[in-house]
Amino acid sequence: MDFDLAGKRVFVAGHRGLVGSTMVKRLRAENADVLTVDHQSLDLTRQTETENWIAAKCPEVIVVAAAHVGGIKANSTYPAKFLYDNAAIALNVIEAARRSSVSKLLYLSAACTYPKLADQPISEDALMMGPLEPTNEWYAIAKITGMKMCAAYRQEHGCNFISAQPSSVYGPGDNFDPEEGHVVAGMMTKFHNAKISSAPSVELWGSGTPIREFMYIDDLADSLIYLLNHYADPTPINVGMGQGTTIKDLAEIISKVVGYQGSLEWDTTRPDGMPKRMLDSSRLTSLGWQPSISLEDGLAKTYEWYKENLG
């Protein structure tokens, strides 16, 4: 059954992040009444605060885009924070949504929840069918908790709660810290700084051989609106591009977009992460949704934003 967002009070948890900020814009375009709150006013890792705020504001829909995120280095350095913060957000927001009789909730998970050596492309059935990639297992465990909560609350309480696992996302508004950010944003900053300083080379982590699929943030936001409108199933659903790119090829594309002409050096003593992660998004495409922004176009848009805002 279609779910109309027009006129609905929609709380976007994590509205300052990459996904959340884009969702706010898209939801407003759907004529939704968007609710947001700063972290200083509401700490979603605190149960009582979260339940009281949601009870007072009475949202009809919640998008859980709030998360403590980062790349391989950040995950490896702060395992307890990644596990606690992300699990607490899921536990508190989902339970508060049930208590306040929220009509629909969309929980944003991540592709890293799948086993390290899952068959490719990865279908939704692969969840919890093998060991996780060690470099992000703490974050993955927390995200699996949120996904399973949505399914459990549907089963026990009849809540219309759904979850989605997007592929690697990038775009304007990302965390462009070269050490703490995700791969696209971190590389873009490294190449930009190297171009400005005329550095002869840029050092990157790993071998460059892992394969990932990268989705521009506007495509992801569009897919999530589509799911809010049309999806109501207990099975978490994959959101991917269907196109794989090696990290080495990604680096070459970004260096070209930035205009950096130096050499790339790969530190193979650093971890690669999961060797290949491609999502089987056929369940989503069978519903009628398709991505529309190519990797090259998305990276160009992202760098234009970077130069205007951070460069």
Image (tube, rainbow, N blue to C red):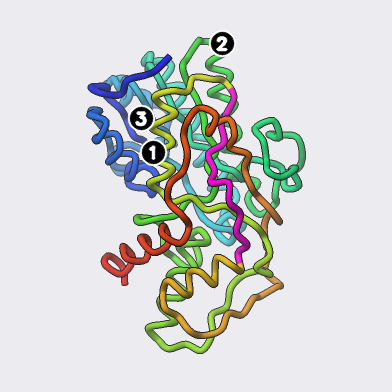
| Cα distance in 3D space between marks 3 and 2 | 24 Å
Name the residue: 52% across, 53% down: 214
Dot 2: within a 10 Å radius of its alpha carbon, few (fewer than 14), some, or many (20 or more) residues?
A: few
Give the x, y percent position of residue 57: 26, 23
Is 243 colored magenta in this rendering? yes
Mark 3: secondary structure: helix
Residue named by callout 1: 222
Q: Which mark is residue 156?
A: 2
Name the residue: 55% across, 65% down: 250
| Cα distance in 3D space between marks 1 and 3 | 31 Å
The quarter of the displayed image where residue 237 is located: top right
Name the residue: 49% across, 19% down: 232
- Three-letter code for the amino acid on which mark 1 is drawn: Asp
Of 86 and 248, the residue lying toward us:
248
CB atoms of marks 3 and 2 within 8 Å: no
The quarter of the displayed image where residue 298 is located: bottom left
Going from N to C along the chain, the mark reached first, 3 or 2, is 3
**Of the two numbered discs 3 and 2 in the rendering, the one whose residue sits closer to the viewer:** 2
